[in-house]
Protein backbone atom coordinates (compact mmCIF):
# COMPACT_ATOMS: atom_id res chain seq x y z
CA UNK A 1 0.00 0.00 0.00
CA UNK A 2 1.24 3.48 -0.81
CA UNK A 3 1.53 5.80 2.18
CA UNK A 4 2.05 9.52 2.35
CA UNK A 5 2.34 11.45 5.60
CA UNK A 6 4.43 14.11 7.27
CA UNK A 7 7.11 12.97 9.72
CA UNK A 8 8.82 15.66 11.77
CA UNK A 9 8.07 18.26 9.11
CA UNK A 10 9.15 16.20 6.09
CA UNK A 11 6.79 14.54 3.62
CA UNK A 12 7.23 10.78 3.49
CA UNK A 13 6.04 8.65 0.58
CA UNK A 14 6.63 4.92 0.60
CA UNK A 15 5.14 1.49 0.09
CA UNK A 16 4.23 -0.46 3.21
CA UNK A 17 2.46 -3.66 4.07
CA UNK A 18 -1.03 -2.72 5.31
CA UNK A 19 -0.66 -4.81 8.46
CA UNK A 20 2.77 -3.44 9.41
CA UNK A 21 2.90 -1.71 12.78
CA UNK A 22 3.61 2.01 12.79
CA UNK A 23 6.45 1.59 15.32
CA UNK A 24 8.24 -0.81 12.97
CA UNK A 25 7.78 1.43 9.96
CA UNK A 26 9.01 4.49 11.83
CA UNK A 27 12.08 2.75 13.27
CA UNK A 28 13.09 0.33 10.54
CA UNK A 29 12.12 2.13 7.36
CA UNK A 30 12.44 5.75 8.41
CA UNK A 31 15.20 5.59 11.02
CA UNK A 32 13.17 7.21 13.80
CA UNK A 33 15.14 5.45 16.51
CA UNK A 34 13.75 7.82 19.14
CA UNK A 35 10.50 5.86 18.84
CA UNK A 36 11.29 3.04 21.26
CA UNK A 37 9.56 -0.29 21.57
CA UNK A 38 9.45 -1.36 25.17
CA UNK A 39 6.51 -3.68 25.57
CA UNK A 40 4.80 -3.89 22.18
CA UNK A 41 1.41 -4.03 23.93
CA UNK A 42 0.63 -0.38 24.68
CA UNK A 43 1.60 -0.60 28.34
CA UNK A 44 4.84 1.38 28.59
CA UNK A 45 4.51 4.49 26.41
CA UNK A 46 8.05 4.29 25.02
CA UNK A 47 6.71 4.28 21.46
CA UNK A 48 4.61 7.44 21.92
CA UNK A 49 4.35 9.84 19.00
CA UNK A 50 2.09 12.78 18.29
CA UNK A 51 -0.32 12.08 15.45
CA UNK A 52 -2.08 15.27 14.39
CA UNK A 53 -1.08 16.67 17.78
CA UNK A 54 -2.50 13.81 19.85
CA UNK A 55 -0.30 11.33 21.74
CA UNK A 56 -0.60 7.85 20.25
CA UNK A 57 1.11 4.55 20.98
CA UNK A 58 2.74 3.59 17.70
CA UNK A 59 3.03 -0.07 18.70
CA UNK A 60 -0.78 -0.24 18.65
CA UNK A 61 -1.17 1.52 15.30
CA UNK A 62 -0.93 0.10 11.84
CA UNK A 63 1.30 1.92 9.39
CA UNK A 64 -1.81 2.46 7.23
CA UNK A 65 -3.23 4.67 9.99
CA UNK A 66 -0.47 7.21 9.32
CA UNK A 67 -1.81 7.97 5.84
CA UNK A 68 -2.40 11.69 5.41
CA UNK A 69 -1.45 12.46 9.01
CA UNK A 70 1.21 14.59 10.64
CA UNK A 71 3.50 12.58 12.91
CA UNK A 72 5.95 14.10 15.36
CA UNK A 73 8.47 12.07 17.34
CA UNK A 74 10.56 13.38 20.22
CA UNK A 75 13.31 14.26 17.75
CA UNK A 76 10.83 16.37 15.81
CA UNK A 77 9.89 18.54 18.79
CA UNK A 78 12.97 20.74 18.37
CA UNK A 79 16.58 20.82 17.27
CA UNK A 80 19.91 20.98 19.08
CA UNK A 81 20.08 24.65 18.17
CA UNK A 82 16.47 25.37 19.10
CA UNK A 83 15.18 22.71 21.48
CA UNK A 84 11.53 22.50 22.44
CA UNK A 85 10.98 23.79 26.00
CA UNK A 86 10.24 20.21 27.09
CA UNK A 87 13.55 18.99 25.71
CA UNK A 88 15.45 21.83 27.39
CA UNK A 89 13.65 21.37 30.71
CA UNK A 90 14.24 17.60 30.76
CA UNK A 91 17.98 18.23 30.34
CA UNK A 92 18.15 21.12 32.82
CA UNK A 93 16.10 19.39 35.52
CA UNK A 94 17.74 15.98 35.30
CA UNK A 95 14.51 14.35 34.17
CA UNK A 96 16.43 11.59 32.42
CA UNK A 97 18.39 8.70 33.79
CA UNK A 98 18.87 5.74 31.46
CA UNK A 99 16.95 7.67 28.78
CA UNK A 100 14.90 4.81 27.37
CA UNK A 101 11.55 6.33 28.40
CA UNK A 102 12.60 9.92 27.68
CA UNK A 103 11.32 10.21 24.09
CA UNK A 104 7.88 8.91 25.06
CA UNK A 105 7.80 11.14 28.15
CA UNK A 106 8.81 14.18 26.10
CA UNK A 107 6.11 13.49 23.52
CA UNK A 108 3.49 13.03 26.27
CA UNK A 109 4.59 16.28 27.91
CA UNK A 110 4.58 18.24 24.65
CA UNK A 111 1.12 16.89 23.82
CA UNK A 112 -0.15 17.93 27.23
CA UNK A 113 1.30 21.44 27.00
CA UNK A 114 -0.17 21.96 23.53
CA UNK A 115 -3.57 21.09 24.95
CA UNK A 116 -3.19 22.59 28.44
CA UNK A 117 -0.49 25.27 28.64
CA UNK A 118 -0.84 25.68 32.42
CA UNK A 119 -1.25 22.18 33.84
CA UNK A 120 -1.39 21.44 37.55
CA UNK A 121 1.01 18.79 38.88
CA UNK A 122 -1.88 16.31 38.92
CA UNK A 123 -2.56 17.04 35.22
CA UNK A 124 1.10 16.35 34.46
CA UNK A 125 1.05 13.12 36.49
CA UNK A 126 -2.01 11.97 34.58
CA UNK A 127 -0.48 12.90 31.20
CA UNK A 128 2.70 10.92 31.80
CA UNK A 129 1.05 8.07 33.70
CA UNK A 130 1.00 5.86 30.59
CA UNK A 131 4.76 6.25 30.22
CA UNK A 132 6.65 3.90 32.49
CA UNK A 133 10.05 4.72 33.91
CA UNK A 134 12.01 2.29 36.03
CA UNK A 135 14.76 4.74 36.98
CA UNK A 136 13.06 7.78 38.54
CA UNK A 137 10.32 8.60 40.96
CA UNK A 138 8.84 10.90 38.32
CA UNK A 139 9.42 14.00 40.49
CA UNK A 140 12.10 15.44 38.22
CA UNK A 141 9.97 14.68 35.16
CA UNK A 142 7.01 16.53 36.63
CA UNK A 143 9.28 19.41 37.70
CA UNK A 144 10.64 19.58 34.14
CA UNK A 145 7.17 19.70 32.59
CA UNK A 146 6.24 22.52 34.97
CA UNK A 147 9.38 24.40 33.92
CA UNK A 148 8.56 23.87 30.25
CA UNK A 149 5.04 25.22 30.87
CA UNK A 150 6.52 28.33 32.50
CA UNK A 151 8.87 28.83 29.53
CA UNK A 152 6.03 28.47 27.04
CA UNK A 153 3.91 30.93 29.06
CA UNK A 154 6.78 33.42 29.12
CA UNK A 155 7.23 33.09 25.35
CA UNK A 156 3.52 33.62 24.82
CA UNK A 157 3.61 36.70 27.04
CA UNK A 158 6.48 38.17 25.03
CA UNK A 159 4.64 37.48 21.77
CA UNK A 160 1.49 39.16 23.07
CA UNK A 161 3.50 42.14 24.39
CA UNK A 162 5.06 42.59 20.94
CA UNK A 163 1.64 43.09 19.38
Image (spheres, grey):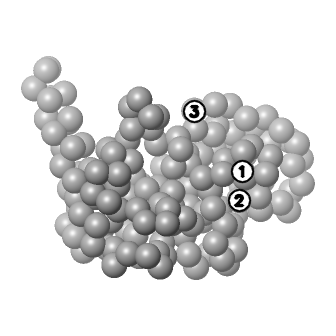
Q: Are marks 2 and 1 in contact (CB under 8 Å)?
A: yes
State the CA–CA distance, disc 1 to disc 3: 14 Å
Quarter of the picture holding the C terminus: top left
Give above or below for 152 relative to 98.
above
Alpha carbon of mark 2 to alpha carbon of mark 1: how far?
A: 5 Å
Query: How far, Cα to Cα, is label 3 from label 2?
Result: 18 Å
Q: Is 66 positioned to the left or the right of 83 in the image? A: right
Viewer-closest of 119 and 75: 75
Q: Name the residue beneath numbered marker 1.
A: 26
Q: Write down the residue under mark 3.
A: 9
- Report the front residue among 147 and 112: 147
Tell me where residue 33 appears, x and y as whole percent: 66, 51
Label 1: state its secondary structure.
helix
Q: How many marks?
A: 3
| x, y percent for residue 142 | 28, 66
Which residue is the site of mark 2?
23
Give the SS element for disc 3: loop
Q: Give the residue displayed 43% in from the left and 76% down from the top.
A: 135
Amino acid sequence: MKLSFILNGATVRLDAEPDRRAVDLLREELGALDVKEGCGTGECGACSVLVDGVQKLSCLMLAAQLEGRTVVTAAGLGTAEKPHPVQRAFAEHGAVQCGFCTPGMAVAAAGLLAENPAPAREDIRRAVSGNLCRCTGYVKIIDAVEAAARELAARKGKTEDAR
